Amino acid sequence: MAKRSAAMLVLLVGLARAQTGEVSLEASSRETQVGVPVQLLITIRNAEKYEAPQLPEIDGAEASLTGRPSESSRVSIINGRMTQEVTVTFAVHVTPTREGTIRVPPIPVLVDGKTRTTAPLEIVAVKSEATDLLFVEVKGSRETLYVGESLDVTLEVWLKPFSDPRQQITLTEADMWSLIDQRSSTWGLFTETLQELAQTRQRPKGAETLRNDAQGNRRSYYRYDVRQTLWPQQAGTLDVGRINIIVSYPTNLVRERDFFSTSRMRLGGSRPVSASVSVPPIQVKPIPTEGQPPFYRGAVGRSRIEVAAQPTEVAVGDPITLTMTLSGPDNLDLLQAPALAQVPELTADFQVPDENLAGSVEGKGKRFTQSIRAKSDAVTRIPPIPLAWFDPKTEKFEVVYSKPIPLTVKPAQRMAVSQIVEGAAGPAAPTRLTELTAGILANYTDADAVLSDQSFAPGAVSAGVAALSPAAFLICWFVRRHTQRLREDPRYARRRAAYRTAMRAIAAASGSSGPAEQVAGAVLGYVADRCNLPTGGLTRVEARNALTTRKVAAHLVAEMDTLLNRCDDIRYAGGGSDATGDLVNATKQCISALERQRW
């Protein structure tokens, strides 16, 4: 018994020592290029409670946490002594913005109620050696603008095509775009646009054009344009953010044979290439208050207003619905309704609610509705409704008016007191009340009628309605449950939409110049959606393994793999490029067959 107690004591001591919180820091590399991030791993060992690290300012670099922390656990027994190690790892990207030595100061981490710090770390950043392979530029439509004005900005990415003379292959603009490291790159204000393109499996189209390289020589490049339109709503400095593009630029291509002995190309090696751009801040000026009409509602640029009323023949106090359509300015989404309560010509003859209206954008206009009520039968029209707009060129306010609307207002109907009491169309009211002493029985004079058979015999229609009601209820319940699940469960919604998304992508590939890439993307995207896997970067081998793991029929897996191999041949070797229709049809049949499988 004493020996067992001693062993338990040793075990508890060992576990207690293993649960002491420790923090460490390591880097994926101590040397990198300007603009190419280094990954730092902050590891917390054997902590009961912890918080995310507070990243300090780093001179000459930008740092950010990437993704969620990873957790792992390990139990070991050595000489009868059990120890357990639980580690939590945070990944940090440190991107140098200048050449030289970058010093990462100690990073504080709150562990088990105590602040612990990592050891300082130094990283060396050198200038990119391949300055003529990648260029990045941002062009804006103006340097200063007013609040509410539209601003068009374009991100231009110039990427030199890679050619392998031994394989006699030049990568296409689609292949070169796929080499951009989307996660490590920073896109500034273009981030949302790139994310939307990625979610719909689209990308900026590249066009081959000429420009001067770093040495001033005229060279061929693929140029990709990413456009964004902004409507600043606050005065001050508009910062487009830092833009830094990172590309895994190839060094050579290798031809290999896969499991089915078919030839395909892959990258034999690559090197990181980065380019950044700094855009001067754009000044956003406030709308001036001098000369601003009291009914101004934020329209910037030439505007128009059209008003319709329904009905136009009413009695005093009846509601009249005004439909106001505003058009002209660029910022329709942010445009507010006319301030009807601020129009004296309207409020003099009508009751007008003072409230904020929600409009809807329809085509090139925004529509608002409001109910007003005439105060008297002397009103003969709805007066013109003014709309004020600010002209950025002249820096003055302009006012436009809608057309007046003729109106017929009748006096409100009035009823005499005798009509209200007696009723104009009813019989004459009795002049005296008669009291009955028989109680409620005085209401019935025919006992046989009261005691007659009141049984109900349902007919065919009634029986059918009674039988269909539960079925209709179940159908409605299943439809509502399906709709709710689509709304609340993104994974379920993604699986359900996988087939439709793939077919839209295939339809788009039919009329494109490079259908093989889009067809392959549609197949891989379909597998990713059905299996709830990350869309970006899914390979042919991973797709095959995913289907095999889920016990999809072997002949369907082989059919999909053969189809993807055919796409690779067309993309890299040019084989079968004249059979676009056959490729698209084969892809539709393959995905339709997979959709019929339960997996």
Image: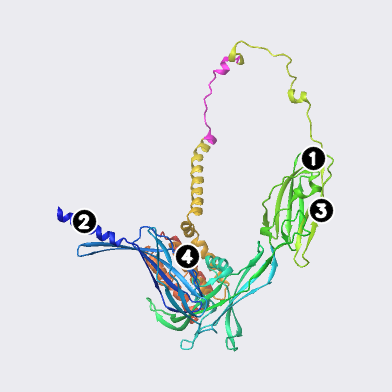
Q: Which mark is residue 430?
A: none
Q: x, y (%) of residue 310?
A: 75, 46
Q: Residue 8, located in which quarter of the rendered image?
A: bottom left
Q: Secondary structure at mark 1?
A: loop
Disc nearer the start of the sequence (2/3):
2
Is residue 397 shown left or right of residue 22?
right
Magenta range is: 444-462
Does the segment drawn in magenta span residue 402? no
Is residue 557 shown left or right of residue 128?
left
Q: x, y (%) of residue 378?
A: 85, 40
Disc nearer the start of the sequence (4/1):
1
Disc 3 + disc 4, Cβ < 8 Å = no
Q: Which residue is mark 4?
A: 526
Disc 3 + disc 1, Cβ < 8 Å = no
Q: Which residue is mark 3?
A: 403
Residue at the top extreme, as displayed: 437
Q: Which residue is mark 1?
A: 375
Disc nearer the start of the sequence (3/4):
3
Q: Which residue is mark 2?
A: 8
